[in-house]
Amino acid sequence: MGATRTPRGRWIEQGLRMLAAGGPEAVRIEPIAQALGVTKGGFYGYFKNRDALLTEILDTWERETTEALIERVESEGGDARTRLDRLFTLVAAPDVPVTGTAADLAIRDWARRDEQVARRLQRVDDRRMDYLRLLFGGICEDEEDVEVRSLLAFTLRIGNSLVAARHGERTRADVLELTRQWLLR
């Protein structure tokens, strides 16, 4: 019986972890293989080179943090307020996957140095903002109010990664809950 092959998704997931922890420079084949407990030979069965892995990492990040998230929010239905509440709950969950906030920050930093990554990030940001506008448009009639709430929610998502674990006596969860309450009023 032949050796069990490490699934492609595990290479991508570990690459995302390394990206989140140290930026694109940290995404290296040998350390990924070591972290997975395998040899790097299996890597080449899935990917032509490191650049192909980086592209797959970005594809996975985009799909999981944007399209899959929107699909999850929409799949359970409800009015705009219910879907916004569900969205806030999902992005604030303590078990946000590696594709979440830490990877977002690493990709934002990477985009400052790489035009292709910057274009992809802009596309993702535009998609996220469009979705927020759609949802807030369902609870606000004033276009300016929709835009302000959308920008605040979007900024919170980015800033959420930067928020210290505590603000005085408030936890990160407390800060997010107060923000949710204000945005949904």
Image: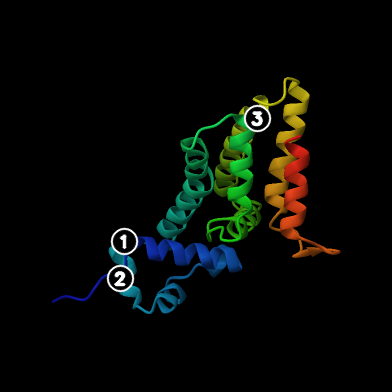
Disc 1 and disc 2 in contact, CB within 8 angstroms: yes
Estimate the spatial distance between the alpha carbons at disc 1 and disc 2, rounded to whole Å: 7 Å
Q: Amino acid at mark 2?
A: Gly
Tell me where residue 178 appears, x and y as whole percent: 78, 48
- Based on the displayed image, in which of its 4 quarters is residue 20 positioned? bottom right
Mark identifier at residue 46: 1
Between disc 2 and disc 3, the foreground one is 3
Taking depth in this image into account, of 183 and 149 the one nearest to the observer is 183
Read off the residue under disc 3: 133
| Residue visible at 64% across and 53% down in the picture | 92
| Residue visible at 77% across and 25% down in the picture | 144
Q: Amino acid at mark 1?
A: Tyr
Q: Dot 1 lies on which element?
A: loop
Taking depth in this image into account, of 120 and 104 the one nearest to the observer is 104
| Residue visible at 56% across and 61% down in the picture | 95
The tag earlier along the polypeptide, 2 or 3, is 2
Mark identifier at residue 42: 2
Tell me where residue 102 appears, x and y as whole percent: 62, 60
Q: Is residue 58 placed above or below 153 in the rendered structure?
A: below
> Which residue is farthest left?
1
